[in-house]
Amino acid sequence: MKRVICVANQKGGVGKTTTTVNLGACLAVADQNVLLLDIDPQGNATTGLGLPKNQDDANIYTALMEGEITPSMIYDTAVDRLKAIPSTTDLYGAEIELVTVENRERRLLELIQQVEDDFDFVLIDCPPSLGMLTINALSASDSVVIPLQTEYYAMEGLSQLDKTIGRIRDAFNPALKIEGILFTMVDGRTVLSQQVIKEVRDHYGDKVFTTVIPRNIRLSEAPSHGKPIILYDFKSKGADAYIDFAHELIQNHKQAERNSASDNQDDVSGQSPQNGTYSQIGSER
């Protein structure tokens, strides 16, 4: 089920880092091996996992510049099966420094290919911009999760991000898919939230996750303690929501694999016989 998923939205404050950290933790407790890459210079995913920022050369910036992930860059976290490569403020200069690097848009892809066989999921926390770091993340990913706050301006940003994803497909990553749109910080009591949810669901259909993440004070508190929500308050509504989200993501991938296997079997069974014999491939599920 190996998947590389970036969590992206050029608008800040929509829950990208909260989603990356808590999705990673919930996938890990569901027995998935997860690597989280923090490519946001602000480093909020790093501190949200209780890891230090700006640690000498053991960070994602050094990996990008040197083209190699070393074992010292991969940190254990407080959640079994969840590992992370931390951010550093040096990433603020990476946008300029990568300009002279050959194949710069695929630099992150080359790094992930070195370690992806060790993990079921690689999650990438992107900066709130559509610069070179986010382009690298989109070029390296199988799919993108788009956190969306239920407000008018967030919807405008969604349209712009959708166009950017199309351009990345055309230029660097034809297989890139929208994993889904995740509503975050939802206050179901407001008419605006309900309107935004309805409009986005009507337009994007099954590309919108069933799970919604509620506005929850415990989710807001957890990063200051350097813990994912399932460690900070397992019984909170925020923890329930991200557990449901991780479960939905896993089930979606399993269904996609079943559909793909079924399609392949249909292709084989539909082939003409060769040398007078019929293939028995796919006769058993």
Image (cartoon, rainbow, N blue to C red):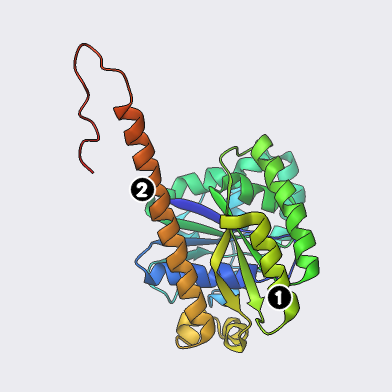
Q: Earlier in the sequence, mark 2 or mark 1?
A: 1
Q: What amino acid is labelled 2 in the image? A: Arg
Give x and y (percent) for residue 232: 49, 86
| 75 up-or-down from 64: above or below | below
Q: Which mark is residue 193?
A: 1
- Bin the neighbour count of mark 1 within 10 Å (Cα to Cα): few under 14, some 14-19, many 20 and up: some
Q: Is residue 220 visible?
A: yes
Residue at 77 percent of width and 53 percent of height: 160
Identify which residue, 175 or 101, lies in the foreground: 175
Give x and y (percent) for residue 34: 44, 62
- The quarter of the picture where the C terminus appears is top left
Identify which residue, 2 or 272, lies in the foreground: 272
Does residue 164 appear to the left or right of 22 in the view shown? right
Q: Which mark is residue 2?
A: none
Looking at the rendered structure, the number of numbered marks drawn on it comes to 2
Identify which residue, 149 or 218, lies in the foreground: 149
Does residue 62 appear to the left or right of 30 in the view shown? right
Does residue 69 appear to the left or right of 2 in the view shown? right
Q: What amino acid is labelled 1 in the image? A: Ser
Residue at 59 percent of width and 64 percent of height: 56
Q: Secondary structure at mark 1?
A: helix
Residue at 77 percent of width and 60 percent of height: 157
Residue at 74 percent of width and 79 percent of height: 191
Identify which residue, 38 or 279, lies in the foreground: 279
- Quarter of the figure with residue 104: top right
| 61 up-or-down from 18: above or below | above
Q: Secondary structure at mark 2?
A: helix
Q: Is residue 41 visible?
A: no
How far is disc 2 from disc 1 in space, using C-alphas? 34 Å
Residue matched to label 2? 258
- Quarter of the figure with residue 261: top left
